[in-house]
Image: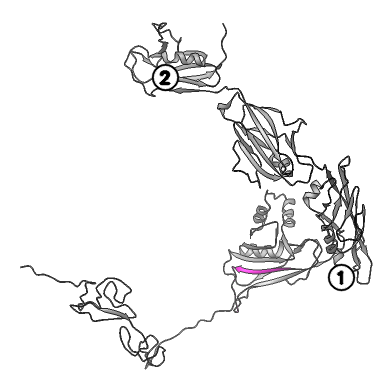
Amino acid sequence: MVQDYCHPKCGDGVRVPSEGCDDGNTKDGDGCSSSCIVETGYVCYGGNSSHADSCKMTVCGDGVVEGAEECDDFNDFGGDGCSAVCLREIKEVAASSDTQVVVTIMPLGQICRIYNARQHETLEDTTYHLQNTIVTGDVSDPNDLRIHVQVLNGSIAMKPLVDIYLAQGRNDSIWQAIVQRETGVHFEPYSDNMKETVISGTHFEVARFLQYFMYIAPDLDFNGYVSVLFTVVSGMVMNHGAEVCESNVVVRVIPVFNDPASVMVLDSIKNSGYQCQAASASCSLAGISLYDPDCESAVDGSCFLRLELNASLGFLSVPGHPAGWQEVFPSLVGHAAGLNAALERLSFFPPALPPEPPEAALHVSVHRVIERTIATPEGLLPMVTSLTLPIHILSADTPPTLSLSSGDAFHGAVFIMSNTKPHYFTDIVFEPPGAIVTTCIIELKVSKGLLFLGDTGGLWFADGTNNGESRLRFVANSTDIRNRFLADVRYAWDDNDCSNLEQFNITVDSGHHEPLTLIALLVLPDCQGYQAQWMGSNKLSMMEDSEISIGHLNLTTKDTHLFLMVDVKHGPAEGDCKLVRWPESIPSFVPGRECHLDGLVKGLNEVLPYLVYRPPPDFFGTVQLEFIVFKTEARRS
């Protein structure tokens, strides 16, 4: 007789004594869990051997004790015997206790502190050696101390420290490597002049650097107070409830009145001067500014600047000034800020026709004037600064064009390509339009092959073209076209295009003139290339003392006059070759006669299909045949 055993099944909707609930499913989060346990915050009811449980969330404070609630006193706050989560609050006092608490009092230790007790002074534009900055206190990690340093009105200068090591022969190509090697500290980030950085290393290395190796460079022409703020990032113990360990060291910068007034000019004007079209209404001469911090330091107004302007040709004007147009403009007096506003509006009226040579000159003189009072700094002295800038006067209407550096015209030029690819065009000279045109459209095109620009920095190709195509089109500044983009043009051709005469077109369009297309010719190298290809199987089989056709070599070339040598090498078995060609077939092998063939490609391709190989008598095994093809000169008898 076999006896059955019954086991409860969670989720079948039948609650048995071993189950806390059974709601007919095994889902979690609905009050009855997947293991038939009532979930916290729920109450389940109604379940029996024929009905599934229904579950709902309990509400603490509704006066009904259900689910996991131990009590419910119609509120949801504690302290009244029933807690805020409806659990009984137990307030009992132990009758006796033998609990002991041991309190250990630790010594306070040394407080973290960064200090520098000295007074620090330096002269304007002079790097200062900031020594004796001391770090004290308990160290949490002697191998990793990190201190953040921030400099206001100056920077941490590395050059004086590096110069010391270089003078001692401790060289390296990178200054950062010298500093790290000699001092042991790291900088994050590093530069030769740092406004802000984190110095890290062992406690000994960082403390030594701050005490002996710190150099501070005030900002250029600054006088006043430079502030150096030190803050411990990690590696030190904070005591007495301190959240930070920091210190501020101040360096006083004493003014030195030894700098003349500076005339500052934009680099583009300094390098190329101004450009102005002849007979134009006016041209802007903006791009000049004055700078004189020494004069500005005289707060009593006893120092000011006198600006003198004159042009060697044409006339000058500042819009709004009553003087109008003048060759020698009346002196302007004031401080740098006011004079700079006038210089920003300075205009030039050119002559009607370009002079010979086509250039004028703008002369600028700045006089520092002192009307000394009792408050004027004694070291502040009168000074004069002068400079001259060229003004290039361009023809009224000169379209852009191209030429070669040799002076020859690009149009009609013939360029002979060598066998080396790519070919570099470095002698193309772009002549910008005579009128003031800042941009031009350039299009380069070859009939066959590809074009490349060696310098494409900041350049956007137009009309769907791109570098490495047969046609390139772009819009750029005239100066960049001349000095960069057309100064390095590269051309590559396909080997199949050899012995051809190709066309190279360059179109220039200023947008103000008719587009100009210039044509040159490209002579490609002779077709001297050839290719040998085995057209049959790479593995041949034959019987001993027989022969087999090896006429599966095919030669191709573009040069019909190419003379080649075909050499069949076979070893170590010394077999031989022969030509079997009707009606002049060779009945027997002549050693070496037909294993070395030469001739024009066309003739070789006619006889190679009849080439036969025979191994030595009684030989069997493997023979490696190798066809060696090379160019040679035709032999004359």
Residue 225, quarter of the rendered image: bottom right
Q: Decide: is 599 above or below 293.
A: above
| SS under mark 1 | loop
> Which residues fall within the magenta stretch?
226-240
Which residue does the image show at 79% across and 40% down from the upper left?
398
Q: Residues within 10 Å of mark 1 (few under 14, many from 20)?
A: few
Q: Decide: is 217 above or below 269.
A: below
Any part of residue 379 in sight: no
In this image, 559 relative to 553: left or right? right
| SS under mark 2 | loop
* Dominant SS type (magenta): strand
Amino acid identity at mark 1: Val
Q: What is the C-alpha distance between the residues marked 1 and 2?
A: 99 Å
Reading the image, the residue beneath label 2 is 552
Q: Residue 611, image x and y in percent?
A: 42, 14
In this image, 614 relative to 495: left or right? left
Which mark, by number, is residue 89? none
Which mark, by number, is residue 299? 1
Q: Residue 226, image x and y in percent?
A: 75, 67
Are the residues tagged 1 and 2 within 8 Å (C-beta)?
no
Q: Residues within 10 Å of mark 2 (few under 14, many from 20)?
A: some
Residue 263, quarter of the rendered image: bottom right
Q: Residue 264, image x and y in percent?
A: 82, 55
Is 229 within the magenta? Answer: yes
Q: Nearer the viewer, mark 1 or mark 2?
A: 2
Any part of residue 634 in sight: yes
Residues 595 and 586: in front is: 586
Q: Decide: is 524 above or below 246.
A: above
The outermost residue toward the front is 514
